[in-house]
Image (tube, helix red, strand yellow):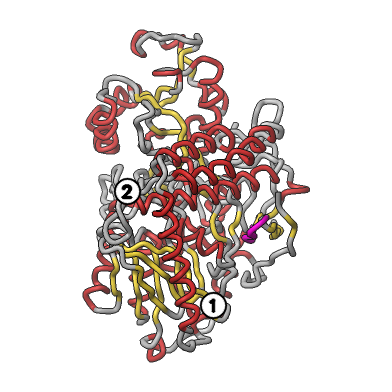
Amino acid sequence: MYTEGAPIVDGKRPDGPLDERWEKRRFSARLVNPANKRKMTVIVVGTGLAGGSAAATLAELGYNVLSFCYQDSPRRAHSIAAQGGINAAKNYRNDGDSVFRLFYDTIKGGDFRARESNVHRLAEVSVEIIDQCVAQGVPFAREYGGLLDTRSFGGAQVSRTFYARGQTGQQLLLGAYQALARQINAGRVKMHPRTEMLDLIVDDGRARGIVARDLVTGDIETYTADAVVLATGGYGNTFYLSTNAKGSNATAIWRAHKRGALFANPCYTQIHPTCIPVSGAHQSKLTLMSESLRNDGRVWVPKAPKDNRAPHMIPEDERDYYLERMYPSFGNLVPRDIASRAAKNICDTGHGVGPGGLGVYLDFSDAIERLGRDAVEAKYGNLFEMYAQITGENPYKVPMRIYPAVHYTMGGLWVDYDLQSTIPGLFVIGEANFSDHGANRLGASALMQGLADGYFILPNTIGDYLADGPFPPVSQQAITSVEQEVVDRVVRILAVDGDRSPDDIHRELGQLMWDYCGMERSEEGLRKALEAIPALRKEFWQRVRVLGTGDGLNQSLEKAGRVADFIDLAELMVIDALHRTESCGGHFRAESQTEDGEALRDDENFSYVAAWEYGPQQPVLHREELLFENVTPSQRSYK
């Protein structure tokens, strides 16, 4: 299944007091003088919050930047879909928040499977992000007196989440986009939309460029640079049905993995508890209802199993507000992994609502009575409109129905404290790396990490690498060989000419992963998946049918290439889940749980990052031991 390799160490992590490490690293990092920056080029793949902010900031610093996205505009990156908010330890509510409390909540929320140094840096930088975004004009919600408003989110007992109604991701992305557009206009960023990275060029041991396909003309093109930054998001679409945009994929990070970048903790996938339930086999994606709704919405199911009465017909004393009952300290604001498993368990016992009993109610009647409809609409109006348009139900009058769905991935390419992968010159930021969330991400922390990496961390660390430059020209042999591999792969996919569409095979992969490597994993199920995935891979290369040619716009070809990578990645996800016999965060092994059904960690044997090296026959496991000097790992409790 896999072989053991040498341990791996983060050699860039500074020593000393936790709250001084980031400042110490910034001071020790070498600088590049302005004249030399103008001679250097950095490729940034992805234009979401991480990629857009990184490209804009690097260009502002004086580097030449080549920016790539497969969408027709950077504004259509999936970050635009984030709804609820962005965390920051500003303590505007004077309710006891601090940088250390945000650090602790994040470490605890990740079930003590993240690095202390990275998480504390994230908490430190969070306060700067809000100032940056306000200066850009991001229209955060404000209180009556004009101060920025905040709301609570899962996994915290303080109010630290800044928001722009239910459109926080969109507004933050527009802020990053305007900064990026300014640099495009200045000529320091050259934008390449409708262009998909298909491979990484490594020359003399360094990442030096990418091979990409123009999605309109079909041309295979090569771009070289002094460093490459991947900001291409997560791999939740491995499951086919997820809250991710349909175009979100794992090709960039997977191809980099095959070139030598270690892949860390691939089994850490997050199930979001607040999604519109599946309605049928026709669906191609799922829709997220923001976690912010759990501030004022109350989650409940009928106490009687298989109670099919309309919700307004079920009296208060016949309702089970199960999160409030099970977790009185946090109630409806428990972290996502806890809320998701609770919803699954309650539905498995026959108390679910809606088609197939796969749903629970998220009820706003108390909030509307207490605050008034106008106040609720001001905070969540666009989310209610979205729900009404999709379901045909009015959530002001009837409770929403929600059920867990695949959302975010905490795993990703392994990076050191500088956000550099195991390939020198390849930096990975945002959801594409593994670094900050451990086994479970707290709500409103994805936007925080993306902007922290792009605006504040990467621009301070990439210079230390580029200080070794300028580097010699990329060898023609390195370029030609990777180009040819990309062309050969496209030709091979087109030549299969089978009878199954890429979507059909992807749907089968997704169901397999949801059944055996989804909300609950077991050794039996994971071993079934390990038998099924190679068979599905063989099926793909024998029966996939791609219509059209490679000489022009061909979305069927795009999908096929991405599905092939999802199949390979899915196998590594299952191997990682099988080897980690503990439960932690979003990774729940049926064999490892407490008497009351909570995740049971095994700190003695699994307190490490699992960093996987690509092997043609078997992956190689490298372990990075996690050191806890400032917090003591303990059994997570939100009761």
- Characterize the local packing of mark 2: few (<14), some (14-19) or many (20 or more) Cα atoms within 10 angstroms: some
Residue 15: assigned label: none
The quadrant of the image that shows the C terminus is top right
| Mark 1 lies on residue | 206
Describe residue 438's horizontal placement relative to residue 367 as left or right: right
Badge 2 amino acid: Leu
Q: Secondary structure at mark 2?
A: loop
Mark nearer the viewer, 2 or 1: 2
User: Eyeballing the image, is 598 above or below 412?
Assistant: above
Q: Is residue 133 magenta?
A: no
- For the residues bearing labels 2 and 1, Cβ distance under 8 angstroms: no
Describe residue 261's horizontal placement relative to residue 399 as left or right: right
Q: Which image quarter: residue 209?
A: bottom left
Residue 12: percent from the left, percent from the top? 62, 72
Query: 116 or 217: which is nearer to us?
Result: 217
Query: 197 or 624: which is nearer to us?
Result: 197
Q: Looking at the image, can residue 243 be seen?
A: no
**Alpha carbon distance from label 2 to label 1:** 37 Å
| Mark 2 lies on residue | 547
Badge 1 amino acid: Arg
Q: Give me the residue at 39% from left, 18% from top.
A: 354
Q: Give me the residue at 56% from left, 81% from top.
A: 204
Q: Give me the residue at 66% from left, 56% from top.
A: 617
Mark sitting earlier along the chain (2/1): 1
Q: Which image quarter: residue 435?
A: bottom right
Describe residue 563's horizontal placement relative to residue 183 as left or right: right
Q: How many marks?
A: 2
Q: Looking at the image, can residue 52 be seen?
A: yes
Question: Is the stretch drawn in magenta largely helix, strand or loop?
Answer: loop
Residue 438: percent from the left, percent from the top? 59, 51
Q: Which image quarter: residue 10?
A: bottom right
Magenta residues span 612-617
